[in-house]
Structures are given as structure tokens and as C-alpha cells.
Amino acid sequence: MGRLDGKTVVITGAGRSTGRALAAALADRGADVHLSARDKEQAEDTCRFIKDVTGSSATAYSCDFADLGSIQQFVSNLRAKTPKIDILINSAAMWLSGSFEATDDDHLIAAVNSTVTGTILLTKHCLPLLEMSEDPDILTIVSKSGLALEGQSEPNAAYHATKTAQTAFMNRLRQTHTHIRVMSVFPPDFESDLEYKSSAWSKQPSPGKGKTMTARHVVEAILFALEQDRICTLESLVLRNSASC
Ligand SMILES: NC(=O)c1ccc[n+]([C@@H]2O[C@H](COP(=O)([O-])OP(=O)(O)OC[C@H]3O[C@@H](n4cnc5c(N)ncnc54)[C@H](OP(=O)(O)O)[C@@H]3O)[C@@H](O)[C@H]2O)c1
């Protein structure tokens, strides 16, 4: 029995990378996981993976966070499956590489729509289900780019803007919705393409230049925050690659 036993968790961006690994780790700890990807087949693939690795069932949904209708449909589908949400995890976000002036307009609009507007709309539409929980949590995987004084080296100013907006939204939500634990996670660049409990999962990153943390470190930090006693809210988890390891 894990500490998340019986908790209903909704997690976005779980068709691949960190969201998929985190969804599996949550199911492994007894959570009832509802997960989304843009492509329903990808979400279903994660559910099959979770079943294989943990023996637990999870529920798959499709949602494009750049599309209001898709978000409304997602929440309506959630309502049909669960009377409450205990934990909402915002992992989906659109990465932008290169300089913002070289990024085409459609990509800039899609990034703001999905990462900023999508996070806000999903949270808004999930609030009634979160209010049905005795112990509601909202956790967003932001980025070190979402910290005001960091991320200047980020190549794309628009990505920095989307992540800073997520930070501001979560900070305000924490003030206005004091009965909800609102948590933000700020990882640096990390290796996210890692399957939960694969042979690479527990490997230490190789020492030396270019070493980086992996999805395992991010997932373990998130589980640590979620599994704290209710009295304790870890509002901001800032992760750094240690220079000395
Ligand atoms: N990896 C890093 O170095 C790093 C560093 C700091 C913070 N982060 C944050 O950590 C989280 C996970 O990152 P990651 O690297 O594991 O993910 P990733 O490999 O960059 O994949 C992005 C995820 O976001 C989803 N997504 C993108 N646009 C979407 C949209 N319009 N609607 C719905 N879903 C959308 C993708 O879904 P599809 O599968 O449907 O495309 C995918 O699941 C993100 O919030 C990211 O910003 C990552």
C-alpha cells in the first residue's frame, strides 16, 4: 500500500517522456490514474505499459491543450469516470527551441495556447472535481525557465514566457485557493526519455561534463512532495544538477 493509495490523479502529457514515467510511478503507489495525451492511442499505450510494469489499470484520454473544445471534452469525459480529483498534475507543455524570432508564428501561438491558456483552462474546469476531494492538490511541472532570475540562457524567450506565466498562475492560485496544496516543480534540463523501471531508470548519470539528471530524479522529487503529510506543502521544488557529483 503506497501513500497515494486510493487517490484519484489526473496527469497530462502522459503519452511519453516524464508524464508517462510519472503516471506509472503514481499507479505503482496505488493511485487511480487518469492520463491524457494528444493522441488517444499514445495514452492507451501508456495504460498498457502501466499494466505490464505495475499490474494496475489506468484510464486513457485524448486532449489537445491548444484547443478549448478538446479541454472541455476531456473534463466532460473525466466527469463521466470519476466524481472527484485528488491530484491534478500539469505536465504537458510545448517546448520551443532556437530563438523566438526564428520560431514561426503558428508555433509561438500554439506554445502559449497549450502551456499557458491550456494550463489555466484545464485547472479552471477541473476545480469543481478538485473541490469534491477532501485533500486536493495541484502540481505543475514548470522549469527553471519559470524562475524569474534564472533561465536567461534559455534559447527561446517565448518558452521562458510560457513557463514564467505558469509560475505566476500557480503562485496566485496558492493565495486564492488556500485549501488546495499548490505545488510547482522547477527542473533544469534533464533526460526525459526514460521508461519507468527500465534498466536505465536506476542508473546514475555518467560523471563528467554534460551529465544531467533524469526523469527518475524529477519523478522522485514529485512523489516526495505529494506524499508529505497534509500539514506540509512543498510549494516550490527547485532541482539543480549538482556541480560536485
Ligand atoms: N525535459 C526537460 O529538460 C525539461 C526541463 C524543464 C522542464 N520540463 C518540463 O517538464 C514537463 C515534461 O517535459 P518532457 O521533456 O518530459 O516532455 P516532452 O518530451 O517535451 O513532451 C512534451 C509533452 O507535452 C505534451 N504536449 C505538448 N503540446 C501539447 C498540447 N498542445 N496538448 C497536449 N499535450 C501537449 C506532449 O504530448 P504529445 O505526446 O501529445 O505530443 C508531451 O507529452 C514539461 O512541462 C516541460 O516543460 C522539461
Image (tube, rainbow, N blue to C red):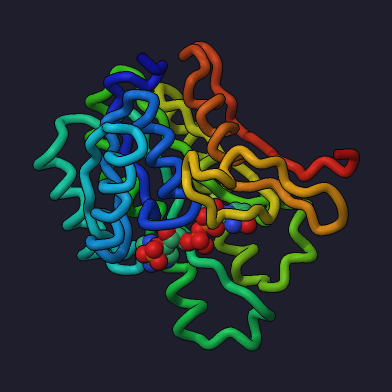
Q: Looking at the image, is 106 positioned above or below residue 239?
A: below
Give the side of residue 83 with respect to residue 20, left or right. Answer: left
Q: Residue furthest left?
A: 80
Q: Quadrant of residue 57?
A: top left
Q: Looking at the image, is 110 positioned above or below residue 117?
A: below
| Residue 130 visible somewhere in the drawing | no
Give the side of residue 219 with respect to residue 99, left or right. Answer: left
State the residue at coordinates (49%, 12%). Answer: 229
Point out residue 191 in the picture as x, y percentages from the top left corner.
63, 55
Q: Quadrant of residue 203?
A: top right
- Of residues 8 and 156, the one drawn nearer to the viewer in this rendering: 8
State the residue at coordinates (55%, 67%). Answer: 95
State the residue at coordinates (39%, 55%). Answer: 13
Q: Residue furthest right?
A: 244
State the residue at coordinates (46%, 26%). Answer: 181
Q: Looking at the image, is 97 positioned above or below residue 200?
A: below
Q: Looking at the image, is 1 positioned above or below residue 181?
A: above
| Quadrant into which the N terminus falls | top left
Give the side of residue 178 with respect to residue 87, left or right. Answer: right
Q: Quadrant of residue 53?
A: top left
Point out residue 164 in the picture as x, y percentages from the top left corner.
61, 55
Give the side of residue 63 with respect to residue 77, left or right. Answer: right
Point out residue 160 in the picture as x, y percentages from the top left corner.
64, 63
| Residue 143 visible somewhere in the drawing | yes
